[in-house]
Amino acid sequence: MCNRFPSEEYSARVEAWKQVIQTQMHFNDLSVRSRQLGLTFVVAALGLSVAVVIQFPDSGLYIMGKFIHLSAFLTAASALAVLAVRTLDLGVYHRMLRGSVAFQMAADKRGLSQNLFNMPSGMTEYISAYSRSEDASFDDNGQVHQGRTRRAADKVSRFYTWVFVFLAVFTILIAIFVNAPVDS
């Protein structure tokens, strides 16, 4: 390690670096937990929808002359819940994560990693490069080389879009194919 600072200042910089990394980990953890909660809700809603169709085949409403089974409303509510979780994840937690990443990268541009670890680039820059590109690499001078990149927010947004589309299609299929029971 290249230590250009008095011991006390060096220790303070290391502690500050640790805090920034812990902040990034915290916001990432919040994002992951929100996705887990959203998927748990989706799986529970789908399971409940199937159970309701089997146990209560005549539970539903007539809307404009068409019978809509209760399970269609459950899956539609699940789709709306996914949109709410997406808003929380991408609109709040991911933005805070990006802010902490930008702070760390700015500190690294001012020499934090070079001074603390004698590294040409900081850990945050490495993680960002490898998460954005499948063919990322760093040369001996610490310069990043990567092909086509894709932002994490775009990947996460696509995940939520696919889950929402699946739920919307499932809702439509229920509405079309689960009919009112025929009175005997």
Image (cartoon, rainbow, N blue to C red):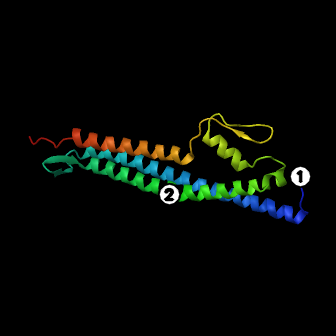
Binning the other alpha carbons within 10 Å of mark 1 as few (below 14), some (14 to 19) or many (20 upward) gives few
The foreground one among 62 and 6 is: 6
Residue in the picture at 17% in, 51% down: 63
From the viewer's perspective, is 15 left or right of 165? Answer: right
- Which quadrant: the C terminus? top left
Residue in the picture at 90% in, 58% down: 4
Residue lying at the far left of the rendered structure: 184
Q: Quadrant of residue 97?
A: bottom right
From the viewer's perspective, is 34 left or right of 163? Answer: right
Q: Position of residue 125 (x, y in %)?
A: 70, 47
Disc 2 and disc 1: Cα gap in Å?
Answer: 39 Å
- Amino acid type, callout 2: Gly
- In the picture of the structure, the residue carrying the numbered disc 1 is 2
Q: What element carries label 1?
A: loop
Q: Is residue 66 above or below residue 92?
A: above
- In the picture of the structure, the residue carrying the numbered disc 2 is 91
Q: Where is residue 83 in the image (x, y as percent from the top left)?
A: 41, 53
- Amino acid type, callout 1: Cys
